[in-house]
Amino acid sequence: MTKLALISSEFRGPWTLFKKELLRFWRVSFQTVAAPVITALLYLLIFSHVLERHVQVYDGVPYTAFLIPGLIMMSVLQNAFANSSSSLIQSKVMGNLVFVLLTPLTHFQFFMAFLLAAIIRGLVVGLCIYLIAMWFIALPIANPWLIFAFAFFGSALLGTFGIIAGIWADRFDQMAAFQNFIIMPLSFLSGVFYSIHSLPPFWQKVSQLNPFFYMIDGFRYGFFGKGDVSPLISLSIVGTSFLVLAWLTLKMLKSGYKLRA
Amino acid sequence: MKPAIQINGIHKSFGGLHALNGVDLTVEQGEFFALLGPNGAGKSTLINILAGLIKPSTGDISVMGFDVVQQYQQARKLLGVVPQELVFDPFFNVREMLRFQAGYFGCGPENDAWVDEILEGLGLSDKAHTNMRRLSGGMKRRALIAQALAHKPPVIVLDEPTAGVDVELRQMLWEFIKKLNRDGHTIILTTHYLEEAEALCSRVAMMKQGKIVALDSTANLLNKFAGKQLRLILGDVNLPASIQPLLRSQEKGAFTFALHDMVQIEFVLSALREANIKVIDMQLNEADLEDVFLSLVGNQND
């Protein structure tokens, strides 16, 4: 066997798992892509209708325009989390995770396959919302690289968090608790609908402890060229959080925590 | 040639429960091997350690020379394990699942002919494009076995593959597994159906309370532990003292003797003739693995 063929055979395992994870959400894209896009658009319609004339966050930026990047990023994050976490919990409850555990895939390959599929689901949902939102209002793009970097690392961070949740949870209600008591509050209290400068000082400080705040603020900075904090600070916080969680996840997978007795 | 499976001093505890208490076992390549034992004997724990799903407390297992912990990638490539539970992935059809499963092991399109062979051999060809969710229980069981075989492993482990399976499927399944064995695959199976182990397997290990209590060829086990049973209808008589030690049970004029070999039949009959006892009826039963099994593991409390 040539060296190239050997490499491709080594690469085929993780590639197959990644492909299966992609197909898994794509087969039910009505639920995994269309539904979150509709939800985001409903938020957009309602909040922009109610608040458009009352709130202006940045000078010269209409409220609807301010809102859209926040909604896109919130959906990117929630869907990246949902992809890896729901795939793992379903496979665990159904028992079919054993088919993957019996294979020669390494813990790193396992992690990468679930992570990349989660990132792609997040980015696909975000892109769909962006394309539809363009019909409502034209958004400026100050720095496309920042937009991509925050969407990528944000979905990577939440995709990783989803893997942790999927490994940890044994039942669907435990996963729902993760979703309802961690992901939802953090995403709603992150400045999607407002600038944290409009909050009382105490809540500003609290918001600054929320990693979702930096992801949304940095992502929005990519569109308008302004935000509540410097995008480089945000990016380093998001990047560092991702690395810490990825390290933790790899430790969990390597030790076989909750997966191998 | 390295053994297909080499198990050295495996212990496994779950909290205070000692599931395995020092198991040593070697299965050579090409064998058709049975692992028998009552529920809770530790068979599935042993298989799960072999498959890498459970980590041993101490001891080591290798598959064709590759340690299942240290060299797990090589070991798992050589191993196909059929899990006991009827699990499936509801998102995909049978062929997709088999392609995925082979893909995880690094097999590509060149493996498709083998996938077709498995589908054919297990009677799944016309279900290849059916979603896993829509398969009947029996078909799901076949698909489960097909998945374990998808990467053409030289060593195949079946953990109670015929539990709750109808006779027709069981026959078909064993024909297919026998063919795999003839083609050189090593087969290790756990089963509750002792007649299956007797008919198929050349060697048998019996487990009890986390230990192997018997390990031999099927023929030797049958000879050593069970021998033959001679059942005589004699009526209300007093047996001569010389044959009393061979008596196993007695019920309303029917006497059952446990014999080691055929020569002892003549010994029993001549003793009866000398005592002027008339034989009304006679039955000779070959022992089966069930007798061995019961004599070894039957008493759970000892």
Image: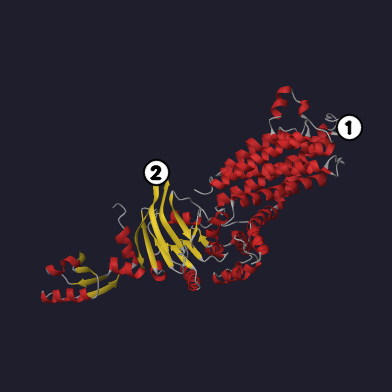
Q: Is residue A73 visible from the viewing direction of this image?
A: yes
| Relative horizontal placement of residue B64, taking residue A84 as reference (left or right) | left
* Image position, residue B3 (x, y; %): 45, 64
Q: Residue at 71% across / 44% down in the picture? A: A155
**Is A74 above or below relative to B181?**
above
Classify 10 Å Cα crowding around label 1: few (below 14), some (14-19), many (20 and above). Answer: few
The residue that disc 1 covers is A60
| Relative horizontal placement of residue A196, taking residue A174 as reference (left or right) | right
Please name whichever residue, B97 or A214, is drawn nearer the observer in this view of the structure.
A214
Tell me which corner region of the image, top left, top right, bottom left or bottom right, holds residue B211. bottom left
* Image position, residue B226 (x, y; %): 28, 67
The residue that disc 2 covers is B16
| Relative horizontal placement of residue B41, taking residue B131 as reference (left or right) | left
Q: Chain of mark 2?
A: B
Q: Residue at 56% across / 66% down in the picture? A: B152
Which residue is outermost to the right?
Answer: A60
Under tag 1, what secondary structure?
A: loop
Tell me which corner region of the image, top left, top right, bottom left or bottom right, holds residue A246. top right
Which residue is outermost to the top?
Answer: A201
Tell me which corner region of the image, top left, top right, bottom left or bottom right, holds residue B42. bottom left
Frontmost of labels 1 and 2 is 2
What amino acid does circle 2 point to? Gly
Q: Are marks 1 and 2 in contact (CB under 8 Å)?
A: no
Under tag 2, what secondary structure?
A: loop
Classify 10 Å Cα crowding around label 2: few (below 14), some (14-19), many (20 and above). Answer: few
Please name whichever residue, B118 or B59, is drawn nearer the observer in this view of the structure.
B59
* Image position, residue B186 (x, y; %): 47, 67
